[in-house]
Amino acid sequence: MSEKKTLLEIEETRLTYMAGMLLKEIAAGLSRRQLTMQGPQGPVTMALPKEVDVEYSIEEKTKDGETKTELEIEISWKS
C-alpha cells in the first residue's frame, strides 16, 4: 500500500525577479544534492540522489480575450 504525505505546499504571487531568485535557490540545492525550502512551519530539507526525473511544459490558455501562460517544472526521485 502506498502512502502520500505533503511536506510543503505554497502558492503565492511574487515579483518575476523574486520567482527567478527562488529558481536559483532550487538550482543551487540540486547542484549540491541537498535541497532546503522554507515553509510556514520552518525549513524542509531533502537529500537528493545522483539522478532525478525532470518533466517540463509550457501551456497557453485563452479565455475571454485574455491569455494565461503556464510554465510547469516537475522534478521527482526515488529514495
Image (cartoon, grey):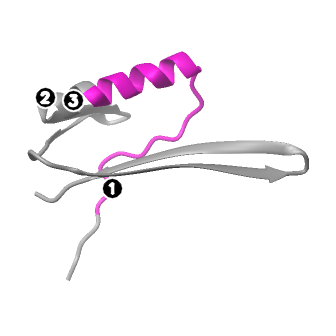
Spot the residue most to the top: 17
Range of the magenta residues? 5-27
- Dot 1 falls on a residue whose secondary structure is loop
Q: Is residue 76 left or right of residue 64?
A: left
Q: Amino acid at mark 2?
A: Arg
- Dot 3 falls on a residue whose secondary structure is helix
Q: Is residue 65 left or right of residue 22?
A: right
| Quarter location, residue 16 | top right
Up the image or down, 72 lies above or below 28; here it is: below
Q: Is residue 19 left or right of residue 13?
A: left
Tell me which residue sits at (10%, 57%) in the image: 79
Tell me which residue sits at (29%, 50%) in the image: 7
Q: Is residue 72 left or right of residue 70?
A: left
The residue identified by callout 2 is 32
Decide whether residue 12 is among the magenta residues: yes
Up the image or down, 46 lies above or below 52; here it is: above
Pointer 3 with pointer 2, Cβ within 8 A: yes
Q: CA distance from mark 2 to mark 1?
A: 23 Å
**Which mark, by number, is residue 6?**
1
